[in-house]
Image (cartoon, rainbow, N blue to C red):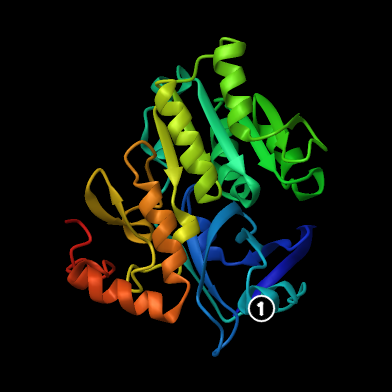
Amino acid sequence: MYKIIKAEQLAEKIYLMDVEAPRTAAACQPGQFVIVKMDSIGERIPLTICDYDRQKGTVTIVFQVVGASTIRMAALKEGDSFQDFVGPLGNPSEFISEDLETLRKKKILFVAGGVGAAPVYPQVKWLHEHDIHADVIMGAKTKDMLILSDQMRQAAAQVHIATDDGSCGTHGMVTAVLEDLVTGQGKHYDICVAIGPLVMMRSTALLTEKLSIPTIVSMNPIMVDGTGMCGACRLHVNDAIKFACVDGPEFDGHLVDFDEAIKRQRIYQTEEGRALLKLKEGETHHGGCGQCGGDA
């Protein structure tokens, strides 16, 4: 059992938990995820790692209530436990393997939409710990829906806020802030990392392509099972079939077919849709076993 050390509501329907998981905390890196399961009848839920404390042996997760399983999760309190807490899974952020001196010469921008702030934060924090200071744009529907903004300010060089209703920061989308930074203020960025809803990542990638800024996106929003066996996170990246959970979750944002991913996510939500996709995609529907066309 994996004990919940801290349980906190960050915003409406958004919760944070620190979970006692020493082996995961010892091995995890920014960009990776875990699979949690509450009990023997609970659903397997993949969640990106928001933070970790190797000394305390804890891993921080953030999740948004979207269905029955996450409603049950939100009811868990400090002292309760998860039956399963599996990880780290997926590939770490590519920053982790880069030469630090080369990385320190780069101007890096993160764009975090909504709950996307959770997987962005550990990357910004890791860079800060290695004396690399990135800029961050955070977007949310309202001021009350912003999460981890204080933590982000402690780790980032600059944090820019955009809200749909104008209740905090710029009134509008994160792309408006990004475009102003580059074309209005003359900022230069060597790379952009965008994490959030699919529509936000698509819009950001379209803009950064126009601005000639290489862009990484995290496709964790389309993950369901987390092992590649359900076929939910199958996507095309530069005409190759990939799976977000086993090949990612990070990919070149200018090569991801977002239109297909968005359409496919909608179809996958129904039982009939899942059956149709499985029939249509045949052997390439799954990829977790490594023998079903996941690298085709």
Q: Is residue 203 left or right of residue 114?
A: left
Q: Quadrant of the C terminus?
A: bottom left
So how many labels did they put on this image? 1
Report the residue at 35% width, 44% height from top. 256
Q: Position of residue 99 (x, y in %)?
A: 37, 28
Residue at image location 46% in from the left, 76% down from the top:
270
Q: Secondary structure at mark 1?
A: strand
In the rendered image, which quarter is residue 251 located in?
Answer: top left
Residue 255 higher or lower than 157, as above or below: below
Residue 172: percent from left, percent from top: 69, 34
- List x then y, in percent, for residue 281: 23, 68
Amino acid on which the number 1 mark rests in the picture: Ser
Mark 1, other Cα within 10 Å: few <14 / some 14–19 / many ≥20: some
Residue with the mark numbered 1? 81
- Residue extending furthest toward the bottom: 41
Give the image quarter of residue 42. bottom right
Asked whether residue 195 appears in the rendered view, the answer is no
* Rendered residue at 72%/45% (across/down): 148
